[in-house]
């Protein structure tokens, strides 16, 4: 149930403070890879300790997101975000002071994984759905997604600067202070007089879940989102080593600056891509835009593999992939809101997102697993292309019209 129109948040408030929340939450996590070597070397750990922590973080984020979404829909996003901001700061402090691998994994994997369920897209999109007019909803979701992209572009060099200036432990403590800013931000996103009430005949959470799972369009969106997670995380994790491996054939791409620049370009063009998706999603069928994004990714990957490798082809590939990177987010969530309404949007968005995170896990894991056994990333690149074509096809029959419900007797 939305807050009263007299006390609901303005669209400007939601975009500014919701965008800041996503910028901080997504931005900080994007720089975690920079801490891998400094932390493992300082503690005498193998790299698998850090890798397990980040893998656990992503799995918890995906698995718990539907539950957090349901709680936010039931009790209000404000309370959930306050708890998420506190857990995020505590997790970063725990990562900074832990000298035991188990404690480090609990802090960075469990606490921050839980925190991300309460401070990222799904919860913010629930607030957007309740406080932004339907004719501007997908555009507003694009703005929020662009904020997360800006966080990636902003925080990676910022975290590298903190590492260089203060070392890993103090850098994490400074990031904990920054993460704590999400707590007062949650107060600025508080929906006054928020109340979740089930009047006679209104849909319950159980009924909403049953309705969504039984809806063919929801299942197709969920399958497509798996592909999104697979592609983006495989590229994010394995692009740099892929370039390094081929430096014996193409020496120019082996320089660390090439991979760093490529990842930065992904973050930069991601801002434009998500914003554009939000605008186009208000004017064109969102299912066709989603299909075009997935097909475009497959074409870009195929071109990257077929053309002679150079810094320039790498940068062009990164720019194209960046434009298509998270532009699926406002479109996918916009369709969910359009079909099912906004009452349980946070929960249903979290359910779709779980599929995304399963894809993320598979993309990261299979990249390393198949490389260790074949000495090449070729199979995983081919999987990424094939899955993109699959997602192109499964999004075409999605029906975007609102579902018709018969009121309970």
Image: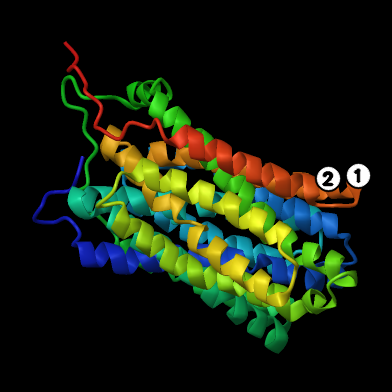
Which residue is rendered at x = 37% and y = 22% of the image? 206
Which residue is rendered at x = 44% and y = 71% of the image? 181
The Cα atoms of the two marked residues, 1 and 2, are separated by 7 Å
- Residue 137 % position (x, y): 26, 52
Instruction: Please give left or right for residue 376 compared with residue 305 in the image.
Output: right
Q: Is residue 80 visible?
A: no
- Residue 20 % position (x, y): 39, 69
- For residue 215, the mark is none
Instruction: Please give left or right for residue 123 compared with residue 311 in the image.
Output: left
Name, please, the residue furthest toward the front.
307
Instruction: Please give left or right for residue 332 compared with residue 343 in the image.
Output: right
- Residue 97 % position (x, y): 72, 68
Pick whichever, 92 or 404, lies toward us: 404
Q: Which residue is mark 2?
A: 369
Question: Is the N terminus in the top left, top right, bottom left or bottom right quadrant?
Answer: top left
| Residue 157 in which image quadrant | bottom right
Q: Which residue is mark 1?
A: 373
Pick whichever, 355 or 373, lies toward us: 373
Q: Crowding near pointer 1: few (<14 within 10 Å), some, many (20+)?
A: few
Which residue is rendered at x = 27% and y = 48% of the image? 129
- Residue 290 % position (x, y): 43, 46
Q: Are marks 1 and 2 in contact (CB under 8 Å)?
A: yes
Q: Is residue 408 visible?
A: yes
For the residue labelled by badge 2, is the local secondary structure a helix, a strand or a loop? Answer: helix
User: What color scheme is it?
Assistant: rainbow
């Amino acid at each position: 149930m939305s807050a009263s129109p007299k006390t609901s948040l303005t669209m400007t408030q939601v975009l500014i403070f919701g965008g800041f929340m996503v910028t901080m939450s997504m931005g900080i996590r994007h720089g975690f890879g920079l801490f891998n070597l400094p932390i493992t070397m300082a503690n005498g750990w193998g790299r698998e300790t850090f890798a397990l922590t980040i893998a656990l973080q992503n799995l918890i984020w995906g698995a718990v997101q539907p539950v957090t979404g349901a709680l936010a829909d039931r009790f209000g996003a404000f309370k959930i975000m306050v708890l998420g901001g506190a857990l995020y700061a505590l997790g970063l402090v725990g990562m900074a002071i832990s000298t035991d691998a188990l404690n480090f994994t609990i802090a960075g994997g469990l606490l921050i994984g839980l925190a991300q369920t309460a401070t990222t897209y799904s919860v913010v999109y629930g607030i957007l759905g309740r406080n932004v007019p339907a004719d501007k909803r997908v555009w507003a979701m694009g703005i929020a997604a662009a904020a997360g992209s800006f966080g990636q572009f902003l925080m990676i060099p910022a975290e590298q600067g903190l590492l260089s200036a203060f070392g890993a432990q103090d850098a994490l403590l400074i990031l904990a202070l920054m993460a704590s800013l999400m707590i007062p931000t949650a107060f600025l996103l508080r929906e006054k007089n928020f109340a979740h009430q089930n009047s006679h005949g209104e849909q319950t959470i159980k009924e909403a879940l049953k309705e969504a799972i039984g809806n063919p369009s929801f299942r197709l969106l969920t399958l497509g989102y798996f592909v999104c997670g697979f592609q983006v995380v495989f590229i994010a994790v394995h692009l740099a080593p892929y370039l390094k491996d081929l430096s014996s054939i193409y020496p120019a791409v082996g320089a660390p600056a090439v991979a760093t620049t490529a990842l930065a370009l992904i973050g930069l063009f991601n801002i434009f891509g998500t914003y554009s998706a939000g605008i186009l999603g208000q004017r064109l069928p969102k299912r066709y835009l989603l299909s075009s994004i997935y097909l475009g990714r497959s074409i870009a990957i195929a071109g990257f593999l077929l053309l002679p490798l150079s810094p320039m082809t790498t940068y062009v590939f990164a720019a194209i992939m960046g434009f298509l990177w998270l532009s699926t987010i406002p479109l996918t969530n916009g369709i969910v809101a359009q079909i099912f309404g906004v009452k349980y949007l946070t929960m249903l968005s979290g359910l779709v997102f779980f599929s995304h995170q399963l894809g993320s896990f598979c993309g990261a894991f299979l990249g390393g697993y198949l490389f260790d056994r074949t000495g090449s990333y070729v199979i995983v690149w081919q999987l990424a292309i094939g899955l993109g074509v699959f997602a192109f096809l499964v999004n075409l029959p999605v029906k975007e019209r609102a579902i018709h419900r018969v009121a309970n007797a």
